[in-house]
Amino acid sequence: MPFVEVGWRVRVADVSAETGLMDAESARQLITARTAAVVAVHLYGQKADLGALRGLCDARGLALIEDGAHRVDCLFEESVADFSVCSFNSVKELPAGEGGALWCRDEADAEQARLAAYLGMRVDTPQRSAQPVHLPYAFSGVPGGKHRMTDVAAAFVKAALEAHAVNRELRRAVARRYDALLRPLQPVLECLRRDYARDSALMYVVRVSSGRREALREVCARGGISTSVHYPSLAGHPLFAADECPRAALFAEEVVTLPCYADLADDDHLFVSREVARAIHG
């Protein structure tokens, strides 16, 4: 949405049929002389192929933006992207109500982001008031809003960091148990193939034919199991509905997200799997 707000036109690339991640060749076909950047989304905890997209951007002088809402690796690893963004929403890897982080490869970009995030000022209130004679306001001339996390939200993120690695491993274990329990339902139901050495396993997503999906969700709902659909194809969004993305459209019609969190008990795995199997077998 920020791109639309500043007047940029957004083109939507199609995805890989296996993973739902951006397909580099589809992105390449959309690039024109007016293209400024490519946004790669790490979906469900899977990591997009940043290497292929980095090569695509370098060949054409484009910025690469990494959307890390479903994994926070850019906080711990050096990214090949020019910009990396993380989300600290309450259902993300580092839950904190609302908030996020932006990493910039270039320090000049980082300085511009800091100015834009705090009213265009070079000195914020804690810095100004850190001494008895407060520092003067330091306006930069850059327009900005107030787009920073609260200290309380940041404290939640800091606390979550301590358990991040453990919780990620627990979610991976949850996903592996689901894989084993749901494997007999193939090919009617398909589990996304995951590289659990790299995957954050933030969400556990399965695919069923569109004709069966809502019936499956209804059976789960009657059993007290919440499900969701992550996500509709952006090609169908009213603001972006100009590109055809048949693989993304099919994904949107078939995916179902099952409960997946670090302390999901074995009995809960079994119950969810039994209800899913009951829905599949009728």
Image (spheres, grey):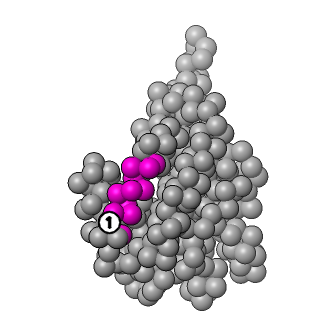
Q: Is residue 270 left or right of residue 228?
A: right
> Residue at (33%, 63%) from the top-left corner?
278
What residue is shown with label 1?
Answer: 279
Three-letter code for the amino acid on which mark 1 is drawn: Ala
Q: Which quadrant of the view contains residue 123?
A: top right
Q: Indicate yes or no whether the magenta region holds residue 35.
A: no
In this view, the residue in front, 104 or 19, is: 19
Toward the top, the furthest residue is 132
Up/down of 274 relative to 117, above or below: below
Q: Which quadrant of the view contains residue 65?
A: bottom right
Work out whether residue 124 can be spotted. no
Residue 138 percent across, percent down from the top left: 57, 35
Residue 219 percent across, percent down from the top left: 27, 60
The part of the chain drawn in magenta is 269-280
Work out whether residue 162 can be spotted. yes
Up/down of 256 relative to 9, above or below: above
Q: Is residue 167 left or right of residue 228?
A: right
Q: Is residue 278 left or right of residue 95?
A: left
Magenta segment, principal secondary structure? helix
Up/down of 188 relative to 28, above or below: above
> Residue at (44%, 76%) from the top-left corner?
188
